[in-house]
Image (tube, rainbow, N blue to C red):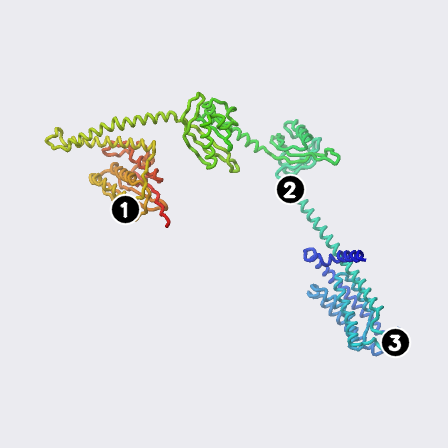
Amino acid sequence: MATGFRTVQKYLKKAFSTAFYRTGDAVTTEYEAWRDRFLWQRLHLALWIALILVLTFTLRDIYDALFHLQELAKVPKEFKTLVFVVEAAIMLSLLSCIALHRTQFGRRHPGFVFLGLSWSITLLEQIWATLNNFALPDIVTWFLVFLSQATLMSVRWTLHLVSQLGVLVYYFSVNTVLGLKLPPQDSDKSIYNVTLILALFWYCFICNLGVYLYDRLQRSEFFARRELETAYQKLGAAEEKYRSIFENAVEGIFQSTPDGRYITANPALASIYGYSSPEEVTALTDIEHQLYVNPNRRAEFMRLIEEFGSVSEFESQIYRKDGSIVWISEKAYAVRDESGKLLYYEGLIEDITKRKQVEEALQEQFNFLQVLINTIPTPVFYQNAQGIYVGCNKAFEEILGLSKQQILGKSVYDIAPKDLADKYYQADLALFEQRGVQTYESSVVYNDGTKHDVIFYKATFSKADGTLGGLVGVILDISQRKHTEEALRVFFHAVSHDLRNPVLGTLMVLKNLLSRSEEKILLPRSILERMVQSSDRQLNLINSLMEAHVSEVQGIVLQRQTVQLHKVVAAAIADLEQMLKENQAILTNLVSVDLPLVNADPTQLWRVYSNLIVNAVKHNPPGLSITLDATVEGDKMCCTVCDNGVGMSQQQSEHLFDLYFRGGNVRNSLSLGLGLYLCRQIITAHGGKIGVKSTQGEGANFWFTLPIQAVEQE
């Protein structure tokens, strides 16, 4: 019993799943719209049939009134008269439904028209009977209407059920409540009985079940049709997509037989071969001899596929239609049937002529660069990101006494002593981490066993994807320079002691003579003064030469402190006041006391200002105007020393700060041209820049920058 109940429950759940569990999706909404259209269209037929049906019964009653039908003889005359009223009401109601059916409301809500049709025939006569104080179980009319509805409009079984319940509930409830009886000719009968109820129940159930099953069948067919249409659309879209890929692919797509014919070819393949259409390609009958420059390539192509099942990057030269030769790359595999028999080859062909040309050009360029690197007398090498040597020039081979084959694939530990290899390795690690350029001094053991002082210049390079590729290194032998520097050091030591000391001694003697009274001096005082001035100049030249050497070798040594620039400028002006007066120079100081502080060496800045002012006075005639100024520009201070003198050419401006450069317009000077060179050294050591802007005949504007001291946050 329980098993049977579960089976029925499962069947009902499955049967009603279409009606209750597939709602809300797009296809269901589309089906419901179709169902309403179907109902609306069938209502048009049903309304006219119902109207004609009522009209036929009206004609029957008219005939009975005129000629008295035997079958209606027992119906009271008063009742016959009242029947015309209900029939007229029914026809009027049906005409109203027909009119409503034609409206937009009737099109959108056909269910209301359906109920209007059903109840116009079944319910109106019940209301008429109630108004005439009797019950009217019109079984024939009910069965006829219910059957017509189920036959003509077999969708929306719930709507059928509502139309049936509306009539039956009214009949059984209202008549029972009001205690109405059947018409006089049947007044001895009950308004309902078990047989009537069972007959109505099963009749309505069968009608509604038929409607439900038909509706479900239509729904299933609708869904199946939509799914089939969707599948066809997807299939068509997929076919169109793959057809588009086939037709518009850049690579040539082909199918070829083992005997050397093309089965299919796309437009790209035809274009690669120089043909105007794929049909011309498929017309080829002997691929081996008609296409391949080397006919043996086709046999090799087939052999590789037979051995490995496919080929990739199979490069060959082929003839185009016009006889020109191009390079192609084939990627293909074998297509076999279920028994393993070879059917055809299928794959892609790419025109790689330009790539081959680029490869040849790159190879030529590589060969040229290798020759170029080999002609460089300085050792050059390059390593990958793992520190392995991947290239070098002849000079590198010669200093190590190894061939390229012995160097490539090795690390620094394989070609250098361990102590030096450790230094090289640590330097390379630091360069790989920081990227960029690296310079440092070290040593290299040459093939003769001697150790040479060298400078390594190294720089990293990147791959195409931006990752680290490795480094390129150049070795500059500075052993000879070291010897030269040592010789210069000895020379300058000799200059400092063997030349400077005698000049100092002479200067002291001359000044001592000048300090005596004129009676005790054998030479005129003017001659002694000129001799003192000459000794001073010689001493200044020697000191400048020594400073230039020290700054060149060791760099400028700064004693930084917080400096107020206007005080440095004032000190320099005060020291040069006598010289300015002698040369009738006018100096204007615009350096403000409100300027920010700078972190600098005041003594070295004093030298910069002194050299620039002295340089301006020496290279211009008397009466020169000099202006000093300083302004703040961002995080730097820009200082200027301007004059209205003779100026200089562009060529002179470009070399003015070079070592030992002297301008051509110098009055009474034995200077070596070291002053401006030292200015550049000092400003560079401070982290600034120095330069000059000048035009011939329009004066000169010397400028330099200094970093402003950062203000500490409280």
Q: Position of residue 648 (x, y in %)?
A: 30, 37
Q: Can residue 107 be spotted in the picture?
A: yes
- Of the numbered discs 3 and 2, the one sitting upstream in the chain is 3
Toward the left, the furthest residue is 519
Task: Residue under label 3, please give it.
Answer: 74
- Vertically, is 613 above or below 304? below
Q: CA gap, disc 1 to disc 2?
A: 78 Å
Instruction: Out of 26 and 17, give the one closest to the viewer.
Output: 17
Q: Sequence-wise, which precedes: disc 1 or disc 3?
A: 3
Q: Residue at x 70, y 49 (%)?
A: 231
For the residue pair 535 and 335, the one nearer the viewer reads as 535
Q: Residues within 10 Å of mark 3 (few under 14, many from 20)?
A: few
Q: Which residue is mark 2?
A: 245
- Frontmost residue, 125 versus 636: 636
User: What amino acid type should be assigned to the residue bearing mark 2?
Assistant: Ile
Horizontal side, residue 217 vs residue 507: left or right: right
Q: Count residues near mark 1 (Cα–Cα under 10 Å), then give few for <14, some for 14-19, many for 20+.
A: few
Give the quarter of the image for residue 618: top left
x 30%, y 49%: residue: 594
- Residue type highlighted by circle 3: Lys
Q: Which mark is residue 590?
A: 1
Residue 425 lies left or right of residue 189; in this view the side is: left
The picture quadrant where one finds residue 452 is top left
From the top left corner, tell me how far across and down residue 568 is, in percent.
27, 42
Contact, CB < 8 Å: mark 1 with mark 3? no
